[in-house]
Amino acid sequence: MCLRAGRCIFSRACWYVQSSLFIVIRMANYSNDLDHGFRALSDPTRRAVVQQLASAPTTVKTLAEPFDMALPSFMKHLAVLEDCGLITSTKSGRVRTCYLQPQRLVIVDDWLQDQLCGWERLMQRLAEHVEVARPADTA
């Protein structure tokens, strides 16, 4: 039992476990969203759809025109984008219009920016190491 006279005798340990658990749960959700985002963007057809929707909401018929595939196959691509939350769609009569949800791209962008910062730090350290290791020119 963690309580003694109303005070936690393992307060630091309990706080650490609770904080770590929160971080692990949050990272699991973040990782899941990130995985879905990369899965959705892994296909050139879906990337082209996202790029086209970035300019304006578009009907499914207009989105499907440039692609040489049957409409049911194209709809599977839209389903992947909708499942991960990158797009939404509304139906009015027989016309379905798709909308980009750019806030979902922020998760992927944040991860990529973190990776870029890490690589830039490594490259800076390498450049500093090369400068220190370079032998002084003798005249």
Image: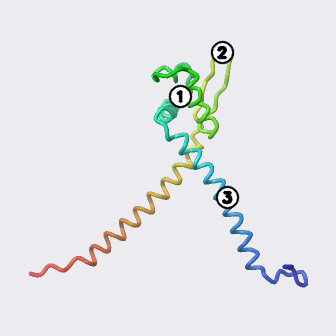
Element under disc 1: loop
Labels 3 & 2 near each other (Cβ < 8 A): no
Question: Which disc is residue 102 wearing?
Answer: none
- Relative vertical location of residue 4 with respect to residue 22 in this rendering, above or below: below
Number of numbered discs: 3
Q: Earlier in the sequence, mark 1 or mark 3?
A: 3
Reply above or below: 39 against 51.
Answer: below
Farthest residue toward the left?
Answer: 139
Q: Is residue 102 above or below residue 4?
A: above
- Where does residue 95 sit, x and y in percent of width and height? 63, 17
Residue 42 left/right relative to 7? left
**Mark toward the viewer: 2 or 1:** 2
Q: In this image, 5 relative to 113: left or right?
A: right
Label 1 is placed on what type of residue?
Ala
Nearer the observer, 10 or 102: 10
In what element is the residue under mark 2? loop
The residue that mark 2 highlights is 94
Residue drawn at 51 percent across, 31 percent down? 49
Give the percent coordinates (x, y) of residue 114.
49, 58
| Disc 1 versus disc 3: nearer the observer | 3
Q: Specify the label residue 26 is tagged with.
A: 3
Q: Vertically, is 68 above or below 2? A: above
Marks 3 and 2 sit apart, C-alpha to C-alpha, by 40 Å
State if disc 3 and disc 1 touch (CB < 8 Å).
no
Q: Please, which residue is most extreme toward the right here?
A: 5
**Residue at image point 18% right, 80% down:** 136
- Mark 2–mark 1 Cα distance, whole angstroms, equals 20 Å
Q: Amino acid at mark 2?
A: Arg
- Looking at the rendering, in which quadrant would you find the N terminus? bottom right
Point out which mark residue 56 bears: 1
